[in-house]
Every structure is written in structure tokens, then in C-alpha cells.
Image: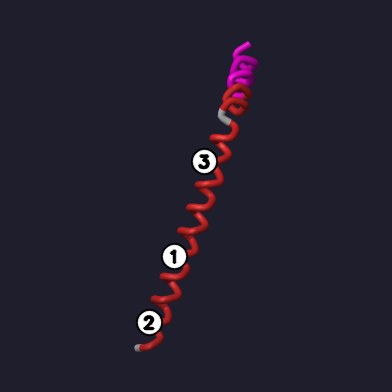
Amino acid sequence: MTTAFILVALVLIITLAGPTLLFICVGYADYVLERRRHLLAVKHAVKRRSDEF
């Protein structure tokens, strides 16, 4: 009985908040990719700078 209640609640949450959850997931993935790209650029700049000395 409890498992069925939990499953129904999860289905309702996913159904009602589907677009919002999708936007949150896409936004977070975009943030992670941008952060990774920025850190790689900084790492490359530091490596290039240390090669000059």
C-alpha cells in the first residue's frame, strides 16, 4: 500500500513539474559545461604562462 502511494506521488510530481524539472536539468547541465570550459581555459592559460618562464 505504501509503495503504491509513493509511486502515485512520484508520477504526480513528475507530471505536474515535468517542464520545470526539465528546465532545471538543462540549465544545470549548461552551467556545468560552461564551468568546465572556463576551467579548461584557465588551466590552458596557466600552462602557457608557466611555459614562458
What amino acid is labelled 1 in the image? Leu
Residue linked to disc 1:
39
- Is residue 9 magenta-colored? yes
Determine whether 31 is above or below 12 in the image: below
> Which element is circle 2 on?
helix
- What is the magenta range? 1-10
Residue linked to disc 2:
49
Q: Position of residue 44 (x, y in %)?
A: 45, 75
> Which element is circle 3 on?
helix
Q: For the residues carrying marks 3 and 1, which lies nearer the camera in this image? A: 3
First reached walking from the N terminus: tag 3 or tag 2: 3
- Separation (CA) of disc 1 from disc 2: 15 Å
Residue linked to disc 3:
24
Residue located at (49% from left, 54% from top): 32
Q: Position of residue 28 (x, y in %)?
A: 50, 47
- Separation (CA) of disc 3 from disc 1: 22 Å
- Separation (CA) of disc 3 from disc 2: 37 Å
What amino acid is labelled 3 in the image? Ile
